[in-house]
Image (tube, rainbow, N blue to C red):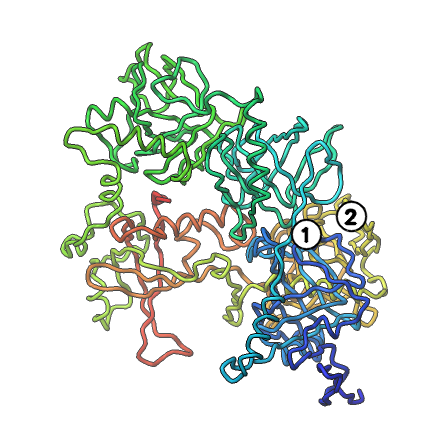
Amino acid sequence: MRSKAACQFETKRGKTEQHLHSEAMPVHVLSDGAGPGTKIPADLSRIHISVLSISTDPSNRSIKGKVVRKGPLVSLAADNFILKAVIQEEDSQPDTSSQSSSINIVLMGTLAKDFNQTVNQGDVLVVSGFTVGKSPTVNKDKLHPCNLLLSGDDACVYVCRLPTPPDPRTQPAAKRSAALSAQVSRLPKTPKYTYVKLGDLKAGPAVNVYGVVTFLKQPYKSRGTDYCSILKITDQSKREILCKIFCKNLEDHPKVFQVGDIVRLHGVKPQSYKDSIELIKTFGFSALTFDGGVGQPVEPRATSQSLHFDQEDRRMVEELRSWAASQSFIPPASTTPLSAVEPNAYFDLDCQLLAKAPIDTCCYLLRVWDGTKCPRQLLKVIVEPNVTEGPTSFSAEKESLIANVLAYDNHMEFARQLKLGDFLRIYNLHASPGSSKVPGLTSSQGVEVDQMAFHLHGGTAFGRGIRVLPEDSPGVQELKRNLEAFQGDGELNDSEIMEIWCTPPEFIDPAILESGTSSAPVSERSCGHNIQPVTLSQLKKSSQSRVHHVRVQLRSYEPQRLYQALKLYCSKCSNIQEVPDDELVAGLFSEASRNSASCRPPSWGISGKVKIPEDSLNRALGVHLFPQLVSEGKHKELIFLRGSTLEETCQLASSYDNIIPVRSSDGHLTLLDLDAPFLFRGRKRYYGCRRCSKAAVWDQTAEGLELTDEKTIAEALGVQLLQFVLLMKLQVQDATGALDVFLWRDAELFFGVSAEDAAANQEAQDSICQTMDSLCPPEGSTGERPWLDLCLKAYQPKEGGAQDQTCYQICQTTLTQPPVHTP
């Protein structure tokens, strides 16, 4: 029986208030406006969230931040809780993104319960006694790639609640003036940044640098999930430095358009590579880019909305411009107009996109112009009108100015994302005369010897790529002047073309909609019902039929984020639950890892140790194997893993066919809490139903055991396997009304993708996302959305709904063709 102890709340005046609690509360409330820094132990030194990394030593360190999100308290067992929150640094360094200044914190045990009772959203916290781990949800929530785990006696939370400021109207004038002066004096000062000359760079911590671009490779898709861009920069030291920048989003890359541009890089780390120094992006990275031309406005192109730029920066830019103007690496002209293109030349082209179309699986057509005319006859590429985005024909005079650019391989993805009317710079474009091997040409379409074709070859060599230029850039201003000089007889200008092309029709004839429109639908019914399609208004009035056929468009859908549509379904009790959050799962593994006491080896197995590949801590984890599998050389088919974190389990999952995480309880092996996966098979994770499972670690010999699939393993463990399902609510419409319908049981048939694959496979996730964007374009009009032939099943919900409520579910419907997606 635990003795009741008084919980101490620290206050500004050093007094205490007493509250009964089962044990000492590790949450301290600093009230009456006392800042956290006035009460935290003096031996704690604060570290900023933006510089936090997995290698940070948390000893005698503290983190300060405002609670911007507070999750629910989750009960794992008696007197055992877990809670997740997000804190954001309010006084972060300039040029620090909100992603790197916001971090997940996971609280365990009594601390989680006390936090839930004491802390409110908006409170400012100082936390200490934490451990730093990798955040498993960084790709989902876009927050800091690390998280903080607070558990045990050393973890502590200090809470600051600022008092309501007094009404200045009730204070004497002298006091108001003094208060305002004090307030101004407390405003944070703009930090003074220091910059390292490129000639002085040495391998070490992150630095800030200025440089002139001597080589650039536009962002391209790396082998992982990020885009990569490469720069070479130099300064007055004449030392050339390579910069490698990996960012998930294209807009986070430096906006460098040409050799000679000037860049300011914050938060780049010098490291040694092959007897030279190169710079790589670190946390807190930001970039500013300036036009390198002498006399051009000093206007920064920023990657961060938090921008620090002063007269000292302006002076450094002007000095680099003057120096670079006298250097030989600056080309006399950065781009070449179509009127000056020579055969077999490789050149950079500034142009405007008029239309585009896919040619085949490895080539995309971009129809562009720059207002000048190529002296040679240009190649004509014929494509089907129904796949062309934009006008399919122009006046004869304008047609003579349009160049057909063929973008291959890795450039296709970027080409699909371009919008009509964009101003582009195409790098390393090849002017090829008389090519007969051009995609899109029919057998009857000949190619004259002097016809010029423009190819953007695959790969990124020589900086090859495409970049969208901002409309206020000098290159675009010159391009606009050339385009405005052209006036086609009786032809709309480009702004009018774009306005007409992007404007939805003001009226859609209901008769056309009711009959189903002349365009072919992108789905088909496989139900076999011999019934006539009805309008949505007729469907709502029907009270007898339980199955309906409709032709509709998708108006909206929920949820917008795919991971929220993934659910876990138990076929035994018909319960549907959320997929456990990775932060919570990581907390369960960390808790089991810390409490991994020794246990008796199981009678049916062989016990041993396994090391984590490339682990700096050289940790060895306990494993248990079946003797029969070991004797047959199949020891990698199944292991029971004890004492691992979630990250370590995922690392080993690439080397073992099946991993069952276990922990020690009263000297025996047991499975982890069923909120955590009970089985890892490669990238796939499998969960069990807490209500229907009678889980126990394998207690049988391996004789006759066949590891066929996850179902066999779940059955042997006494676990009721949960099935991944997709659950979405769609709002469909026709000319007569709108209707909410559910997509669930036949969601896999509809998308042609299994929910299990969508939970683990990025390609499957992308397929579903692209399908939904195609059926319901984010900025598309109703007229742009494809038509769907659906089979709807009407039913009354058994629980939780009104007695006369009717729900509808899409069934036995398949997408017959991928809808054309308009970015």
Residue pointed to by mark 2: 615
Q: Quadrant of the C terminus?
A: top left
Residue 135 in the image: above or below residue 797: above
Identify the residue at image location x=81%, y=60%.
604
Q: Looking at the picture, how far across and down is residue 202, in whole percent?
A: 75, 36
Q: Residue 650 shows which numbered tag?
A: 1
Residue 668's disc is none
User: Taking the image as drawn, is residue 710 in sight?
Assistant: no
Q: Element under label 2?
A: loop
User: How many residues crowd around disc 1 within 10 Å: few (fewer than 14), some, or many (20 or more)?
Assistant: some
Q: Residue at x 30, y 28 (%)?
A: 482
When asked about the image quadrant of residue 83, the answer is bottom right
Amino acid at dot 2? Asp
Q: Quadrant of the N terminus?
A: bottom right
- In the rendered view, tell whether residue 45 sits above or below residue 329: below
Going by the image, does 477 lie left or right of 227?
A: left
- Vertical placement of residue 668 versus 312, above or below: below
Counting residues from the start of the chain, the first of labels 1 and 2 encountered is 2
Percent coordinates x, y for residue 241 in the rendering: 66, 31
Looking at this view, is 750 or 358 the one in front? 358
Q: Residue at x 22, y 70 (%)?
A: 542
Q: Where residue 172 appears, x then y in whole percent?
A: 54, 83
Q: CA distance from mark 1 to mark 2?
A: 13 Å
